Amino acid sequence: MAPWLSEHEKGQIDALAGQELSVRAIAKALKPRPDRSRPSYATVSRYLASRGRRIVRKKPGPKRLLSRKSERRIIRFVSVDALTSGQVVHELHLQCSARTVRRTLQAAGFLRYKRVSRKPSLSSDNIRKRLAFATAFIAKPMAFWHQVVFSDEKIWSCDGPFGSSQRWVDCRAKSSSYARRQHSGGGKVHMWAGMSLRGLTMAVFVEGGLNAVKYQQVLLEALLPFGLEMYDFNFTFQQDNAPAHTANSTKAWLDALGVTVLPWPARSPDLNPIENIWGVLSRVVYRKCRQFARVAELKAAVLAAWATEAQKYVVPLLESMPRRLQAVLDVRGHHTKY
């Protein structure tokens, strides 16, 4: 205790300390008495320590641009509304830079700036069918998957890859954030390709939209020769549920040729290992943010990447099929990490 303080001064110190003032600010606010000088910094500090009060010490450096309340608002807006740092400054009318907002978000500890995964929305019927597929094929041996030819289409753009958006993501949230896939714009080429344990099919570019007639022509050029050469036509064909694939004429055409088609659940790119090949090829084709002035240049780059890079990943991706199916069962039919 500081016996040289009057009861009036002690009351003043307690009141000012309740306003979260620093010790120096409290000492400066006190007025001197007629018989003695104003209480010093050390006197106020000892008194507060004897009372068990928290001593507010002024931190070195420039004055804070954001209050605690503003920091909480920033974190809430970014977590809920998926705003960028620049949008936060504009929406909240902050008197600080976007860089200051980013430092605040990084200091929170549970926010991370990451690429948003782009996955299709799943209905209850999609989830049920994904679960049924995983249950039916989880016990299949690897020999079965070695006989499957996986296929898919990919749209390549001259301007760069689709779906490179990033945002701040709250890592405390249990549900992940997904953005719906969209295909639009110009300067694009539509490509079909397939892969299996025994190699890669020929890559085929399709002009314009893909309908049933064009799709059957693509399979006639690329799939059937591959299946005859590599499997003597003893293979299972995987395709997704695009309209050209599920058209009655396509089904009848494949059935007439004796091609066994895998009953694939809709909206399940995470189960198709060739989707990961597209990611690898995109990094190669668009390396160093490369863009293409002509479609012919883009096609040449894609074909070169398909011929030199894709085969390296075929075996490990095919061997991941049991893990992919197990992941679907673990999340009860919802999106998986694949």
Image (cartoon, helix red, strand yellow):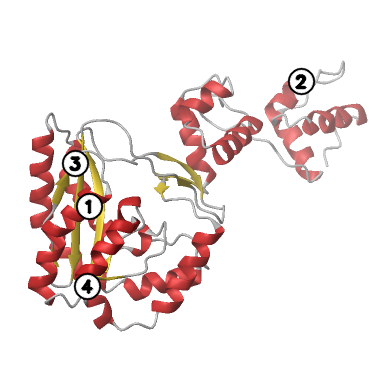
Q: Nearer the viewer, residue 224 or 47?
A: 224
Which-is-in-front pick, marks 2 and 1? 1
Between the residue at mark 3 and the residue at mark 1, the CA separation in whole angstroms equals: 27 Å
Marked residue nearer the N-terminal end (4 or 1) = 1
Q: Is residue 68 above or below residue 139?
A: above
Element at label 3: loop
Counting the numbered discs, the total is 4
| Residue to which mark 3 is pinned | 286
* Residue 273 visible, this angle: no
Q: Quadrant of the C terminus?
A: bottom left
| Residue to which mark 1 is pinned | 215
| Residue to which mark 2 is pinned | 29
Image point 70% across, 39% down: which residue?
A: 55
Q: Which residue type carries mark 4? A: Gly
Element at label 2: helix
**From the viewer's perspective, is 85 left or right of 282?**
right
Marked residue nearer the N-terminal end (3 or 1) = 1
| Residue to which mark 4 is pinned | 258
Marked residue nearer the N-terminal end (2 or 4) = 2
Give residue 291's quadrant in the image.
top left
* Residue 133 visible, this angle: yes
Residue located farthest toward the top when viewing the structure as drawn: 34
Which-is-in-front pick, marks 4 and 1? 4
Between the residue at mark 2 and the residue at mark 1, the CA separation in whole angstroms equals: 84 Å
CB under 8 Å between discs 3 and 1: no
